[in-house]
Image (tube, rainbow, N blue to C red):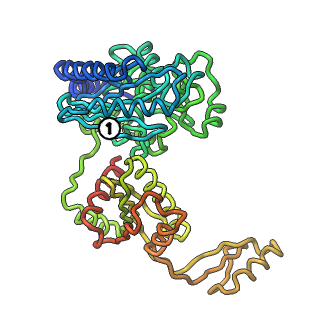
Amino acid sequence: MDSNRLKSPAKFASLMSKVLSRVTPSETEEVAMRAGINTAIGRISKIISGRAEIVVAGSSARGTNLSGDSDVDIFMLFDNTVSKDQMEVEVINTAKHFVKGVKNESYVIKYAEHPYARLILGDLGLNIDLVPAYKISSTDEMGTSVDRTQLHNEFVKANMTSSQKGDVRVLKAFLKAHSIYGAESKTEGFSGYLCELLVIHYGSLLGVLEGIASAKMPLVIQPGRDAKESADVLVKRFGKDFVVVDPVDIGRNVAANVSEESLARFSLASRFLLDNPSESTFYSKANSDVNPQRKIAEIRNRLGISVHSITMDFKDISPEIIWQQAKRLERKVSVGLESDGMAPLISLCNISGRKAVICFFIENDARSISIANGPSVFMGNAADAFINAHSSAEFITFKNDRLFAVHRIRKRAVETMRKIASSAANRPSHMEKGRMSIHSDAKIPLESARLIYAAYSAKISV
């Protein structure tokens, strides 16, 4: 670790103090949240009547929640003699009875590995995820993947100091400012638990920033483990160059959802902040979405490129599924464009409600020739076979001793996009039938342009 990276310790300390005061819940906010949580737990306990243990989990339980964050995780822990089906019935019935006859309260059933309920409690100012799980003392007893959350609580509480809780809050704010906080498909960034583990491992926020700023790949972190395995073994096991072994479940990589780009952004942003501790380096560049169509036109004209978008309307499903399916199509189309010789400079994805848009900034959006590279002329049979296979080429010639053939073709980016996006194999399964449209340049609709420009602003915020 380059411990001398920080250029101005005094400026850094002053800035971190200011940020900490902004992101730490005030005493009034904290008291109100605790009172709301206690009220909710009391009502849940009355409904469940001893059939499950009720515990608070997540950042609000561990003291690393941010000011203004009204989301709370409450777990209903059942004995392992209770079936999964019965757990699901219990949580749904609890949600129904919780809000029954109460004004400004409602619930929705959401789905992860199994159903859980989100309680929207207007008067209490809370959104509670009510999650069923099995009560366990080790991961050997796990019946569902969410069971380990209670062990995360115990590990963090046992290994994190009061000052480190503040460091986690500032780290979360820093990652949010650079659009890489959260492990969901939208962000492919750093979860709250991962932030906590990084601070525990490196000892402080400064330690995290210096460690990530000077990181070399592969980066393997094993917090809280005395018997450490070799980095090569763990990289091979998890198939990732960034591994943070879960201290309560050594078979899990907590950083599995962190994309290479998100880690790279974190490293670069950390370097900028350490070199020049300031508001401008802590927070990423802000961009207005006013007149997005005009701004996209300015980008097109300035760079001499074309911009093409695919807009889709989805069924009423979770945003996580929409993100997953839209990003999958983005990758498929990008590969197709590249193979057709029209590789995008950048590709983007964004969603709003049930609408998703993917977009491609392309330098050459039409192609009139295709080049096929062949073998050395001295490779005998292979050279003869290449010439026969490309008998319809405009011409075949040499580059040094190697053959290459030039064919006349006519391909356009829009045609490639339409072919790939409309195929049954690639079309998002949860997209509304017939609700896909492709637009280019000035014809991109306003709503799509707004989503594109927001994604573009985040993409180039280096």
**Residue at 20% across, 18% down:** 31
Can residue 393 be spotted in the picture?
yes
**Residue 201's x, y, as percent?**
47, 21
Relative to 381, is 142 above or below?
above
Relative to 312, is 249 above or below?
above
Q: Nearer the viewer, residue 94 or 1?
A: 94
Q: Is residue 451 left or right of residue 113?
A: left
**Residue 394's x, y, as percent?**
62, 87
Relative to 338, is 60 above or below?
above
**Residue 223's x, y, as percent?**
51, 21
Disc 1: which residue:
176
Relative to 227, is 194 above or below?
below
* Quarter assignment of residue 310: bottom left
At label 1, which amino acid type do we have?
Lys
**Residue at 50% across, 68% down:** 420
Q: Is residue 123 left or right of residue 320?
A: left
Can residue 267 be spotted in the picture?
no
**Residue at 37% across, 48% down:** 319
**Residue at 55% across, 80% down:** 369
Q: Nearer the viewer, residue 86 or 325?
A: 86
* Quarter assignment of residue 191: top left
Q: Nearer the viewer, residue 139 or 87?
A: 87
Circle 1 SS class:
helix
**Residue 229's x, y, as percent?**
64, 24
